[in-house]
Image (tube, grey):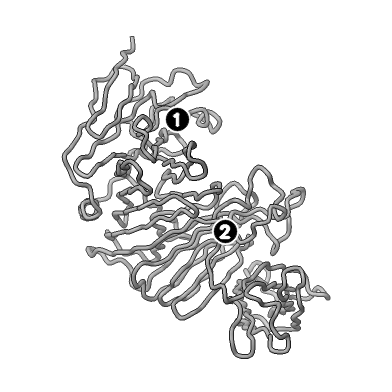
Amino acid sequence: MSSIKTVVLAGLGWSAAWVFLPAPPVSAAIERLEVTYDYVGGLAAERAAAPYKEPDRELPKRLAELNYDEIRDIRFRPDQALWRNEALPFQLHLFHRTAAVREEVQIREFSSTHVQTIPFIRDFFDYGKLGNMGSLRSSLGYSGFRLHYPMNRPDTFDEVAVFHGASYFRALGAGQIYGLSSRGLAVDSGVPGVTEEFPVFTDFWIGKPRPGATEITVYALLDSKRIAGAYEFIIKPGHPTVINVRARLYARDNISLPGMAPLTSMFWFGKNSDRPGGDVRPQVHDSDGLLLHTADGAHIWRPLQNPRYILNTDLRAVKPTRFGLIQRERAISAYEDFEARYHERPSCWIEPVGDWGGGQVRLVELPTVNEYGDNVVAYWVPDKKPEVGKPFDLAYRMTWSLAQPGDDNLARVQSTRIGHLPDHGWGQLFWIDFAGAGLGQRNPANLAPQIDLGPGAKLRHQTMIPHPGIDGWRVALQIEGDNPPPPGEKPKPVELRVRLRDGYEPVSETWVYTWLP
């Protein structure tokens, strides 16, 4: 016969009843400890100095055999949310370990003086139609968590941030729905012929919020075969939501392509690609462009693509001030999808804190045939990479917003369209629309496009005509490529750049495109 235990977890101020099959009673030990960024950094250094240990992925047989629909039947019970009964401004929900996300994550709650591990509690979950799940040990742990905060209405706790699976996390601001994600770190992402390494957040410490708090602190310990690290996330929900991040990394081994502050998103099709047969929507994407600003005044917009094969684009920068994956198209008519609501999915951009020095933003685009998985990654690759045995520190600010950053004195790229050349020659037709910053009011006699083509392309024809619909201008380019590649060989990517100038003064951001002839 199964036994039923009721346990009160005190000290940091929460209680719950849990039910489990025969097992010894488990207490949530309360430890007197001050949890800080330096404390977690010390643990990361210890991890990196020891041989790598794979996270626990073993599951009870019943859990391991659940299919996708059955996994969806397991839901956290909102009435069991941590801090709910204390009327605090944040609430914590937990994720059950399943075959979808197998890794055990240790989750702890901390105050200014104490810390305790949150044990697995069966009564936190509604198992729906699954019935008896068999023996589930109290040490099973969780696979992640999500934070709630009343952003849109004072009487409703909205999802603010989710940490779930490897080092993935994502956040929301007011009036947004989930779209793109972030990660703690990318390692060898998008390198042809190389298996990507996915670091995992193995441990979290979540600060218990005080009454009236408008932000919450989360610490995390990251681990993988070649690197370990400590992270601090200070999450401030709002319109937009801002997350201040600090990371201290310790390499176990050399890493040729470390991806800092990575963002990952989905782009299936848009204005610059053909619509798949049978799909009635004009566009489907979580993000439609990569934005990069630098301290020397460069403002770059790179439209996203769904390429025929893996496409890597590197944008060199010294002292970047901002980069991110942006959902620039906000009209609901651009998507006509009232369920997916792509027009309400956030943009996210990274602003370095401190001097990041030189490096490059790498954009990785993978082919996709649907909207159900991310196929776009963007991250910072520093010139100075983490060295074995030495700490590598990085700090940045993340903004999750429906708006977009930029210089109001510069016109922006509103859209990019591509098509065949009039004679269907070996080349491409591009329509690039610029608007904003009073562009339509400038003297047309002084306006001209500055066009730069990389090796492998030549300009056949160009025109610039006013666009009355957006009070801007359209640059139309006919680009010819070199001879087609031999059968079986991939064409070499060609970089194209266009910006508008009023005399010698740049008056728009720079459109950058990686063209595959």
Of the residues shown, which amino acid type is indicated by label 1? Pro
For marks 1 and 2, the one nearer the N-term is 1
The x, y position of residue 375, in whole percent, is: 56, 55
Per the image, the residue denoted by label 1 is: 78
| Picture quadrant where residue 23 is located | top left
Give the percent coordinates (x, y) of residue 294. 46, 75
Residue 5, quarter of picture: top left
Helix, strand or loop at label 2? It is loop
Count the marks: how many? Answer: 2
Q: Which mark is residue 272?
A: none
Q: Nearer the viewer, residue 451 or 54?
A: 451
The quadrant of the picture occupied by the C terminus is bottom right
- Amino acid carrying mark 2 in the image: Leu
Residue 413, image x, y percentages: 64, 71
Quick check: marks 1 and 2 in contact, CB under 8 Å? no
Which mark is in front, 1 or 2? 1
Calculate the distance from the C-alpha at mark 1 to the C-alpha at mark 2.
37 Å
Give the quarter of the figure containing the N terminus.
Answer: top left
Residue drawn 27% across the image and 67% down it:
387
Classify 10 Å Cα crowding around label 2: few (below 14), some (14-19), many (20 and above). Answer: many
| Residue marked by disc 2 | 366
Seen at 58% across and 64% down, the residue is 289
